[in-house]
Image (tube, grey):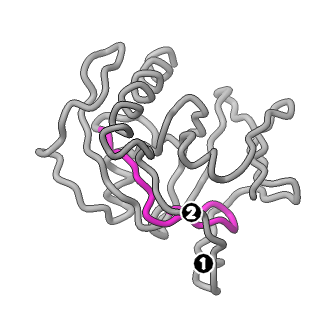
Amino acid sequence: MKGLVAFAVALVVILLVVGERMGGGGPLSGSPAPAQGTAAAASRPAGRFASEGIAIARGSDGQFHFEAAVNGTATRFLVDTGADTVALTTADAEAAGIAFNPNGFIPIIQTASGQGWGTMVTLDRLQMGDVELRNVGAVIVRDLPVSLLGQSVLGRMGRVEMQGDRMVIETR
C-alpha cells in the first residue's frame, strides 16, 4: 500500500513536468461532451450514477475503484485525487487497443522503489456514465499495478466530494 501511494505521488510530480513540456495545458485536451447514441449507452460502464453525480463506494481496501470505458473497453481504475492525469497499466492499454512500443518506454517517473518507465499516449475516448471525453492525454506505465484516474479527468468531470464512505463526483 505504501509503495502504491509513493508511486502515485511520484507519478504526479513527473506528470506535472510532462504537462509543461506538452505546452503548459497539461496532458489532457478537448472538452467533455455528452455520450451520443445507443452504442454509447450499450458501452456505458457499470457504476452508480445518482442524480447528484457519480457515487463510488469505498472498497474493502479503503480505496475508491471505478469502472470506465477506454476506447469502448471496460477498465477498472483507482480514483486517485493525488494523480495529475490518467495512467494505464500495459495490460489495460493493450485491452483498449492502444498501440505502444514497450521497447520505446522512457524514464518518466521516480518512485520509492526506483525509476518508472512509460510512454505518453492519447486515448480516443474515455467514457464515465453519460460523460464522454475525447482525445484524452494519458501515460502507460510499465509495472503499474492498477490504472489511475487522476485530476486531469476528475477536474473536468465536476466537483469531487467525500460523503462518509463514498466519493461523489458531481458531473457538469
Q: Is residue 129 left or right of residue 25?
A: right
State whether residue 161 is above or below residue 52.
Answer: above
Q: Is residue 75 left or right of residue 121?
A: right
Q: Residue 104: which numbered mark, if any?
A: none
Indicate whether residue 47 is drawn in magenta. Answer: no
Amino acid type, callout 1: Ala
Indicate whether residue 132 is drawn in magenta. Answer: yes
Q: Is the stretch drawn in magenta largely helix, strand or loop?
A: strand
Q: Quadrant of residue 59?
A: top right
Query: Mark 2 falls on what kind of element?
Result: loop
Q: Which residue is mark 1?
A: 40
Q: Quadrant of residue 132?
A: bottom right
Residue 56 placed where, x, y %? 74, 45
Q: Of the residues tagged 1 and 2, which is closer to the observer?
A: 2
Sequence-wise, which precedes: disc 1 or disc 2? 2
- Location of the C terminus by quadrant is bottom right
Residue at 46 percent of width and 45 percent of height: 86
Q: Residue furthest bottom?
A: 38
State whether residue 13 is above or below residue 146.
Answer: above
**Disc 2 crowd, CA 10 A, few/some/many (<14, 14-19, 20+):** few
Q: Residue 31: which numbered mark, if any?
A: 2
Query: Mark 1 falls on what kind of element?
Result: helix
| Residues rendered magenta in the picture | 126-141
Q: Quadrant of residue 112?
A: top left
Residue at 40 percent of width and 29 percent of height: 11
State whether residue 98 is above or below residue 20.
Answer: below
Q: Residue furthest front?
A: 24
